[in-house]
Amino acid sequence: MAELSADELHHKVLETLKNGEDPKSFVLEWCKPQCLDSFAVLKRCETALKIIKTSDPEKSCLFRYRQWVECVENCAQPQIFHHLHSAHNRGKLDPFFDNVWTLRYLFAPLYPFVRILIGAKRMNVLEGCPIE
């Protein structure tokens, strides 16, 4: 999958999203060849571990493995985030969530007044003045 260009990856991810599938596994496979350095370090650690394991069973290559996974995830994350939050896909994934956030920011200037009114009602400050 490394032979795909960034544009081809973009179109493939858009197709995957239109089909309702998760593009993360595809993008992770596309990013693995870009992290060959950390993968080579991991393989060297694993071969050295086979020799050392008999004398020190506590040793592991977990840190090297984590570095490789982190490299692949750091490569894939911007690709996936870009496609999920691009203007082309906006509203297709969860339109209710987008509308709620739009309303929240639309009415954000009114929040302090609403909080004061709700707080005053809870503290019985406006006991004689019902809020309608």
Image (spheres, rainbow, N blue to C red):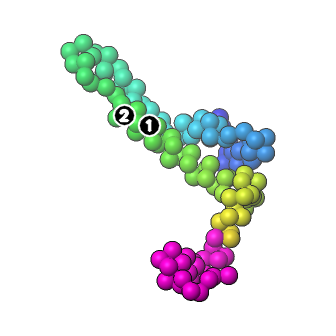
Disc 1 marks a residue whose amino acid type is Trp
In the rendered image, is residue 7 in sight? Answer: no
Q: Quick one: SS at disc 1?
A: helix
Give coordinates of residue 27: x percent, y percent. Answer: 62, 41
Residue 65 versus residue 78 in the image, above or below = above
| Residue 121 shown in magenta | yes
Extreme-top residue of the structure: 54
Q: Residue at x 53, y 46 (%)?
A: 75
Give coordinates of residue 110: x percent, y percent. Answer: 60, 81
Q: Which residues are magenta?
A: 104-132
Q: Which residue is mark 2?
A: 64
Q: Which residue is mark 1?
A: 68
Q: Quick one: SS at disc 2?
A: helix
Q: Residue at x 20, y 15 (%)?
A: 55
Q: Residue at x 71, y 44 (%)?
A: 13
Quarter of the image where the N terminus is located: top right
